Amino acid sequence: MTGRRVLGALAVAAVVGALLFLPQQSTAYELRWDVRVLRDGIPPIYDPRLTTPDNINLKPHEMVLAVEINGDARAYPIEPLVSYEIVNDVVGGVPLAITWCPLCYSGLVYERVWDGQTLTLGVQGALYKGAQTWWDHETGSIWSQVFGEALDGPLDGAQLRPVVASLTLWGSWLKQHPTTLVLKQRLSLGAPNSAFHLQSLPKDIWVIGVDIDGAGAGFYFDETARLGVQQAVIGDTPVVAFAEAESRIVRTYEARVDGRELSFDVDGSELTDRETGTRWDALSGAAVSGPMAGTRLRPVPYFSIWDWALRLHYGRETPIYPIQGPVPP
């Protein structure tokens, strides 16, 4: 009897497993979800526990996805994000979704508010174009992580607002934000996605992705850090990307002030525009001397992502700077 029960249990488990991982097609956008687990089978963080820097054992070289809003600075180590994928938090009074997809190395932060309603986001357990999807508890709509757009359900077509965030070293973030809070939850043994835990270490091959009104482009981090600065027109917006190799600091700004397009040279952590000779602090975007002193470059949200994933989402001809030969077919 015991043997039959075991065999029966295994058979049931096999059927359930097959059902859970069957590809599913949605009518909206003709989504093909090539992996499916139960909603929140990868458990997100709905009630984050945060602590002060002196109360957590986090190495200076570990990566964090960090934000600052209204003077409230918070850091979310990549190690737990790999396992939980979504953190529902409120930063500076703004409800946020801090998200990470270990398959695409994509980290994005959004305001989780639509039409005045605060959404609670969970892990849908499916992939869209190779990246994670979410579901919201309030309407059951399904969302794309990379686009921040509802793909199916009552909110189909809704777009969440991206938030300026930093993927950087914990030591670099702490130096700039000594009063920051940091996520206390850490990766648990045997947790989902634990095989990706090494993503907590710096990666030189990530792409700095930028989306301007649906037009996507990217900057190779290692080459941008080597040059110090790169520029491109994305959509109709001139964008300048600044990166430091050692600190892993990245900043992206609109390269235009009062309707005047600017081009930049870099010297350490300072930018100088060729048009007016104004010197700019690359970390804050503030003009520190010259004709435009007192003005500030407008930050442009960026996101990390593998190059193939960027092109999978935005199209094979999506430019990634510097352009290195023909775009892959």
Image (cartoon, rainbow, N blue to C red):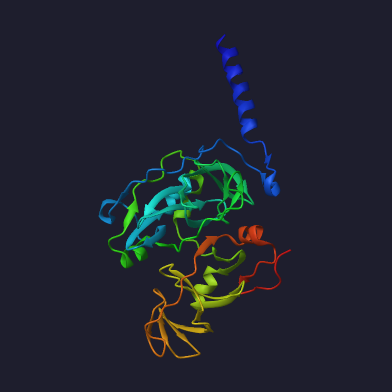
Is 54 left, or right, of 249 in this rendering?
left
Q: Tell me if residue 138 comes above or below residue 255 in the rendering.
A: above
> Which residue is rendered at x = 48% and y = 44% of the image?
194
Residue 181 in picture, x, y percent from top left: 31, 55
Q: Quadrant of residue 58?
A: bottom left
At 49% from the left and 69% from the top, the residue drawn is 300
Q: Position of residue 45 (x, y in %)?
A: 42, 44
Q: Residue furthest left?
A: 54
Percent x, y for residue 157? 61, 52
Q: Quadrant of residue 211?
A: bottom right
> Looking at the picture, does residue 300 appear above or below residue 46?
below
Left or right of residue 80, residue 126 in this image: right
Q: Residue furthest top?
A: 1
For the point 57% across and 14% down, the residue is: 5
Q: Is residue 295 above or below residue 48?
A: below
**Residue 318 percent across, percent down from the top left:** 66, 66
Q: How many numbered circles does the render carry?
A: 0
On the picture, is 191 further left or further right than 68?
right
Residue drawn at 64 percent across, 52 percent down: 129
Q: Residue furthest front?
A: 116
Name the foreground residue: 3 vs 306.
306
Quadrant assignment for the N terminus: top right
Locate the C terminus and report the quarter of the image it occupies: bottom right
